[in-house]
Image: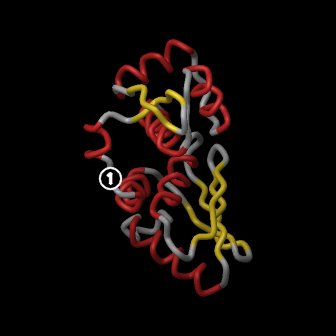
Amino acid sequence: MKQLRQRAIRDLVEQRPIRTQQELAAALRERGFRTTQATISRDVAELGLLKASREGTQAYALPPRLIEAEVSGEDRLRRILHDLPAEIREAGLLLVIRTLPGSAHAIAAALDRARWPDVAGSVAGDDTVFVAVADRAGLQRVKRRLLHLAGDDGRL
């Protein structure tokens, strides 16, 4: 859970200005993470977050060591899908990915970061991700790609 939470923190800090630990806690709650102020404080310290000027205000930023070490969305998605049990189903022009409680956001964030052209967007709950695509052909391409990243071992 700590790794997923810290990945979410990195994504949030990259996506929008987060000025305070309270703002960070609220943003994490929006993504389904329940945290205490002490946990947020430890995560900020462990990640080595810095304050930097962003959009005219001081906000958290990733330290250079995390930016350099950051893997692509597709690499992250490959790791997550390989490590987590998940299943995928088609529902109209949606792919529905079911996984362990607390893990859906990590999958959706990695998928969004990968910026696949066939993916219109994703919505994550606690254990379910809805992936929207524009057409049937795109749905099949995304499904095949997810299966490939998962190792196509029947779990997805």
In this view, 50 is above or below 148: above
State left or right for residue 84 relative to residue 99.
left
| Residue 28 figure quarter | top right
Q: Which of 59 and 79 is in front in this view?
A: 59
**Residue at the spot of label 1:** 71
Q: 101 or 94, which is in the foreground?
A: 94
Q: Quadrant of residue 62?
A: top left
Q: Position of residue 154 (x, y in %)?
A: 46, 68
Residue 1: where, in percent of width, then height? 48, 33
Residue 142 x, y percent position in the rendering: 52, 75
Q: Residue at x 66, y 55 (%)?
A: 123
With respect to residue 95, does 36 lie above or below?
Answer: above
Residue at far bottom of view: 137
Amino acid under disc 1: Val
Residue 7 shown left or right of residue 71 in the figure = right
**Label 1 crowd bin: few (<14), some (14–19), many (20+), radius 10 Å:** few
Residue at coordinates 28% horizontally, 38% vertically from top-left?
Answer: 64
**Residue 10: which quarter of the image?**
top left
Residue in the picture at 47% in, 57% down = 113
Q: Which of 50 and 6 is in front in this view?
A: 50
What's the coloring here? secondary structure
Q: Residue at x 55, y 46 (%)?
A: 100
